[in-house]
Structure formats: C-alpha cells, structure tokens
Amino acid sequence: MTLHARPGNPSSFLLLFLLPCIASETPRMSQVTRDFSQIGRYLRPANRLSLSRVPFHIRSSTSTPSSSRLLKRWAEETGSGIRGSLVFDPDKTKQIREEAEQTFKSAVQRTEDRKAAVNASEAELFNNLAVALKEAKMFGLSSEDARLYPRIQMACQDLEENYGYKYKSDQLAGGWKLLFTTSQAYRNMQGMTGLSKAPMTELHSLYQILRKEKVTELQFQDALRSLPSVEEAQALSEEKPYGTSATVEVLNTFGSSKIKNEMRGIFMLDDIDNDGYKFTGVDQIVTEADSGGQENMPAASRAIQICSYISSDDQFRISRSTDGTVFIFQRVEDIEDLFEKMNLPKRGGSTWGGLFGR
C-alpha cells in the first residue's frame, strides 16, 4: 500500500510511521472483495456479456499526474510552501497524535476480530450480522441505517470468507424478502419505484421472486428485444433461461391499505468457479411492470447479483451487485399466500380496477 501525504493534512505525517505497524498486522484483502471489483470477467466469458449500465470495467487513467507534480501544482496555485511533501501546523501536534493512535488501535482491534472470525462457528458469525440487522429501521434506506453499513459489510464478509460459496444454484429459486441493502439507488428512491415518497405513503417491504418455471420462446424473445443494444441481444441469444423473475415493492398507503408494485421478466444463472470459490450470478432481464396502479407498462432493465452466501438452514442469503453492494434476504416459503393475506394480487401488481372494485 502506498500512502501519499497530502498538503494541509498534518495527520498523514504520523500515519507514515504507524502504517507499517498496521500493515504488518492487517490480513490480506479477501478474495471475496477483490473478485467483486472484477466480477464481469467471470460472468459469461468470451465477451458474451456487455452491460452498458453495469460497472464491470475498472477504468484506469494512463495520464494521472504523479504526486510530486500535483504537490508542485498545488503549491503554485495556493502560494504555500512545501517542506518535502508535508505541511505542518505545530499547534495541532497533540490532536494529530491522538487521531493517529486511535487509527492504530482501531486497526489492531479489527485484526483481532478477523483472527477470531476464522475460528468462529457459522452461528456466531451470523449472530453478529443479526444484531446489526436488528438495529436497522428502514432496510438500510435511511440516514440512520447508513451508519450500520460498515458493521453490515464486515459481518457479511466474515460469513462469505468462512462459510460462503457452499450452496447449490437450485437453492436460489423461491421467494425472498429484502432485510437490508447498501444500495445507493434504492436509498435515493426510498424503495424500488420512488412512489413511497408520495403523501400518506410509506415503504412496507421489498421482495425478490425467482421462479423455476418454463420460459416460452416468446417471453425470451421479448426479453432480448428489451435490451438496449443489438450486441447484448446477440450475446445472450444462445443462453437458456432458468425461469421467471419478479421484484416486488409493497407500500402502505391511506392508513392500513397496501399497494403492490411489480417489475417482472426472466432470469438466467451463471455458475462460476474462480480460484476455488464457487458462486452463482443471477442475471435478471425485466420486460414490464405494474406500478402506480397501471399494468403491463414497458420497463426494460437488467440487473446482476452474485450470491455469496446461503445459510446452512437455507433461510438467509447474501448477494452482491457487481460493485460490491450488499443485499441481504430472508426466504419466504409461500410468498403468494403472503401476498393474499395482505389483500394483494398473488401475481402482478395492484391496478386501479383492483383497488376500486372494477
């Protein structure tokens, strides 16, 4: 790891001396985290996948200025002097030392936690995740929940590294309720559609449904036509769909009434073996939606999640998007009955006719 001391940041001076100690105690970056940043090269190899809206590629600049040139430019623009590569404020020495010591203590504590995780049982590691999830108020979508992100990420990583990738792809089929996500897109929308922001409306729950059922040729062709480019459609034309999929948002509105929004389409599975880690990518292609009381609206989109962990009791699942965003699900045994109990359609979304007794 290379540390560049930045002008105007005196704390970097002490960190230059403390970081070698931290680095010697900190374990290597996990295979899990490293692989997610480049997961695109394992999904559908031989250029059979080219998503324009998914960050598969790690873009690097060949013209990045060196740190010394940046420092020189900064000095010229601000008129500040540079003592080597550091700028000091002697009055803040005590504060700098305290911050550096705290950084060191935190790193050492995390190292001890990681060592303990290696010998911990699955139940113990899952309990760490469950405790954090219990504190969440809004599925990870509120500002308060965002403070839990580091704890959630660490707890998920412990489970992934020690007990992940031991499931069978068939276990992904079924209904899943979203417990927590670090998705910025979901947080911005406060759900799937953004309709939870409407007056007298709030998010009740979110679900993912992966049904292992036959996909007709017409459904598959409709899915291919919905893709944004001919190249994507051609790349997937020889694939075999695994089944149909739906992403569901349930809203509370006007007191106790509920509305169901649904985006649906097909999905495919990619079984991948990378350096001993076996995992499955869920490739969803959405073709239409029932939303806001309107049905069968065109809703072309595509999303890929990589399942990194399914609990040994088959009840909980951790998936990640290609940029590492976390999605934590709990299995729902009979999701259509659940919707029926909420006075919602078993399949499809709520429509104006259904809401007002057409």
Image: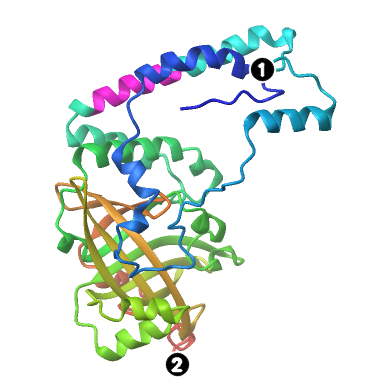
Q: Give the range drawn in magenta.
A: 106-117
Depth order, front residue of 122/9: 9
Residue 57 is situated, as x and y percent measured from the top left of the image, at: 45, 56
Q: How is the image coloured?
A: rainbow
Image location of residue 134, percent across then percent down = 37, 41
Which element is circle 1 on? Answer: loop
User: What's the amino acid at mark 1?
Assistant: Pro
- Residue 23 placement, left or right of 161: right
Judge whether 20 appears above or below 280 on screen: above
Q: What element carries label 2?
A: loop
- The answer to which of 155 and 303 lies nearer the viewer is 303
Tell me the residue at 44%/61% (across/down). 204
Compared with 95, 225 (above or below) is: below
Please, what is the dominant secondary structure of the magenta stretch?
helix
The amino acid beneath tag 2 is Arg
Asked whether residue 81 appears in the rendered view, the answer is yes
Which quarter shows the C terminus?
Answer: bottom left
> What number of labels is visible?
2
Q: Residue 116 in magenta?
A: yes
Task: State the residue position of label 2.
Answer: 358
| Residue located beneath label 1 in the image | 10
Q: Calculate the distance from the C-alpha at mark 2 to the C-alpha at mark 1.
A: 69 Å
* Vertical side of 200 occupied by 106: above or below: above
